[in-house]
């Protein structure tokens, strides 16, 4: 709730004498703005849970039809913003923050038979506007195909780990690339974008690998 700037969903009462640690929303926002490594650490924690939950590296955005129209006459600035906001974790971004993110998003012309990225490349989120990409199988990861309307990496890439697979273009098209380091640099300057991004992560089904159940227990440090 504090990451999303939302009211608490539960009332917590102690059953005896207890000592608790308190961090206000304003204090947390200050810490996040002043400590980029803290932001990375939060993403890494969520990514670890997502990995245990079996989060897919390629997943549909549900906007394949719209993407096909975007790619027909070249990608316009407003279409770039709309494409970015179709990714579940970016859906909470306001128009202004989405434009800021679009400014650091690279448009890539994919040519059939060429490599889109290598397993050792820097972490990034890829959004396939049109065309098709084949992710090659490794010892630990199966092969996968990404087509127009699909995202590759997304939350997992933002948290730090590389995608870990080579990607080859099997049908020409257009892709968008959001570099992880460029994004974190932008987040350091725009606390509102950071808040909206966390809101998107928590609300996106399966993206953060965090699912609340009726048996969830809140920890209390007692003394």
Image (cartoon, rainbow, N blue to C red):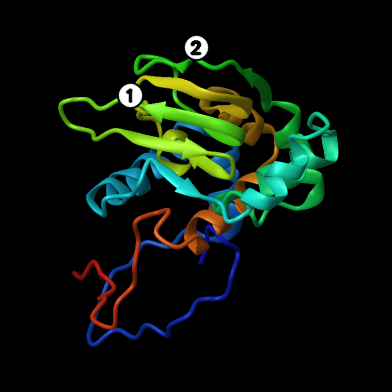
Residue 128 coordinates in the image, percent (x, y)? 58, 35
Q: Are marks 2 and 1 in contact (CB under 8 Å)?
A: no
Q: Nearer the viewer, residue 199 or 116?
A: 116
Question: Where, quadrant-wise, is the C terminus in this rendering?
Answer: bottom left
Residue found at x 43% / y 83%: 10
Apparent side of residue 77 relative to residue 6 in the rendered image (left or right): right
Q: How many marks?
A: 2
**Residue at which label 2 appears:** 114
Query: Within 10 angstroms of label 2, few (less than 14), some, or many (20 or more) residues?
Result: some
Residue found at x 45% / y 31%: 37
Residue 171 coordinates in the image, percent (x, y)? 54, 25
Residue 17 coordinates in the image, percent (x, y)? 24, 80
Vertical side of 213 occupied by 170: above or below: above
The quadrant holding residue 58 is top left
The quadrant holding residue 207 is bottom left
Vertical side of 172 occupied by 65: above or below: below
Which of the two discs, 2 and 1, labels the residue nearer the N terminus? 2
Which is closer to the viewer, label 2 or label 1? 2
Rendered image: mark on residue 196: none
The quadrant holding residue 40 is top left
- State the separation of the CA atoms marked 2 and 1: 15 Å
Apparent side of residue 164 relative to residue 39 in the rendered image (left or right): left
**Residue at which label 1 appears:** 165
Apparent side of residue 8 relative to residue 70 in the rendered image (left or right): left
Q: Is residue 153 at least partly visible in the picture?
A: no
Q: Mark 2 falls on what kind of element?
A: loop
Residue found at x 70% / y 43%: 68
Q: Is residue 181 at least partly visible in the picture?
A: yes
Query: Within 10 angstroms of label 1, few (less than 14), some, or many (20 or more) residues?
Result: many
Q: Mark 1 falls on what kind of element?
A: loop
Residue 29 coordinates in the image, percent (x, y)? 59, 49
């Amino acid at each position: 709730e504090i990451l999303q700037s939302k009211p608490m969903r539960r009332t917590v009462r102690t059953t005896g004498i207890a000592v608790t640690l308190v961090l206000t929303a304003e204090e947390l926002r200050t810490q996040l703005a002043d400590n980029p490594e803290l932001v990375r650490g939060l993403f890494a924690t969520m990514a670890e849970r997502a990995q245990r939950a079996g989060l897919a590296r390629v997943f549909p955005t549900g906007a394949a039809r719209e993407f096909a129209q975007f790619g027909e006459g070249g990608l316009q600035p407003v279409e770039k913003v709309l494409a970015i906001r179709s990714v579940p974790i970016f859906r909470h971004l306001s128009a202004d923050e989405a434009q800021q993110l679009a400014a650091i998003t690279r448009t890539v012309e994919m040519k059939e038979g060429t490599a889109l990225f290598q397993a050792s490349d820097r972490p990034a989120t890829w959004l396939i506007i049109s065309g098709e990409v084949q992710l090659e199988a490794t010892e630990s990861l199966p092969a996968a195909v990404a087509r127009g309307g699909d995202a590759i990496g997304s939350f997992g890439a933002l948290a730090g780990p590389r995608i870990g697979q080579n990607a080859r273009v099997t049908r020409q098209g257009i892709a968008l690339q959001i570099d992880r380091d460029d994004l974190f640099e932008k987040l350091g300057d725009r606390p509102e974008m950071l808040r909206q991004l966390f809101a998107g992560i928590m609300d996106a089904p399966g993206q953060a690998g965090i699912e609340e159940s009726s048996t969830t227990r809140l920890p209390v440090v007692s003394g």
